[in-house]
Amino acid sequence: MILEAKGLRKLYGEFCALDGVSLGIDAGEFVSIVGPNGAGKSTLINILTGVVRPSAGTVRFKDREIGGAGPARLARLGMARSFQLVHVFPDLTVLETLQAAVVARLGRAARLFRSLARDREVQAGALEVAELFGLADKRHVPARQLPQGDKKLLDVASAFALKPVIILLDEPTSGVSTADKTAIMDTLVTASKRIGLRAIVQVEHDMDIVFAYSDRIIALHQGKVLADAAPGTILADQRVMDTVIGRKAASPRALSC
């Protein structure tokens, strides 16, 4: 198992964001985490990627305890999360954005704002990812000038530039057209095979995307795992579907675990 969480609980004062969540991600899996707003999806991703430390429970990646380790350390171990550098550095070009990720992978952070064009390894690594994601022709375009679909691709490409073992994506297709969503997902899956990525975990609201690409779906509700099963099993469970897509009103959220 590549990534494993046991009994995760997260409290913010008296508010319980996660209550006893356990899951495991195996090699070769594409897993989607779904649920209504407030289900705990973002909190779970933040804990799995070391951004937030759980109040209780454990997270293990490659047999190491990583609770609260932070994205930088996890990136060195082989876990990546989309950087959203487009929003952080909107004036960087496509190539410069990817170079920043390659620099992080190579441990050359001090060179981030120097002239990276002279660093052949960084240049080659960034160009490789740009070509993989169909962004090579736009490599000199500032990120802020890209269409929304290409901005999303660049966010995901930045994470892939780390050449991780596993990647975690938070809403990789939000804010783009249906046609762009499919193009992004197809590119993501193709790229994962090309670089030898072993697993993908995504939080996604678009259920068409979820059912089309997932090997397994983990449904959260009120901070707990409502279901963890193959897409066909989830689709056949009316209770889960009603809760996940909001056809029935959810009961009030508990304030404590």
Image (cartoon, grey):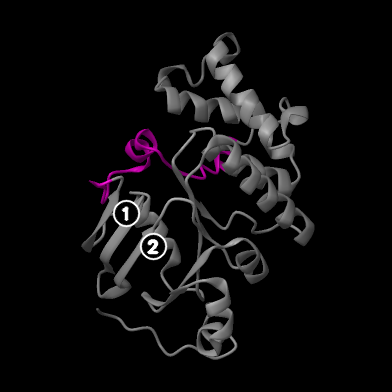
Mark earlier in primary sequence (2, 1): 2
Look at the image and give the residue range highlighted in magenta: 63-89
User: x, y percentage for residue 216?
Assistant: 50, 66
- 117 on left or right of 75: right
Question: Quick one: label 1, few (<14), some, or many (20+) residues within 10 Å?
Answer: some
The answer to whether residue 158 is seen in the rendering is yes
Q: Amino acid at mark 2?
A: Thr
Labelled disc at residue 94: none
Q: Name the one closer to the observer, 174 or 6.
A: 6
Q: Amino acid at mark 1?
A: Val
Q: Is residue 187 above or below residue 116?
A: below
Residues under numbered marks 2 and 1 in contact, where contact means CB atoms less than 8 Å apart: yes
Q: Secondary structure at mark 2?
A: helix
Q: Quadrant of the C terminus?
A: bottom left
Q: Residue at x 49, y 34 (%)?
A: 163
User: x, y percentage for residue 114?
Assistant: 52, 14
Q: Residue at x 65, y 56 (%)?
A: 173
The residue labelled by disc 1 is 52
Q: Is residue 65 magenta?
A: yes
Which image quarter: residue 204? bottom right
Q: As drawn, which residue projects farthest toward the left?
A: 56
Question: Quick one: label 2, few (<14), some, or many (20+) residues within 10 Å?
Answer: many
Q: Secondary structure at mark 1?
A: loop
Labelled disc at residue 43: 2
Q: Residue at x 54, y 63 (%)?
A: 215
User: x, y percentage for residue 70?
Assistant: 32, 43
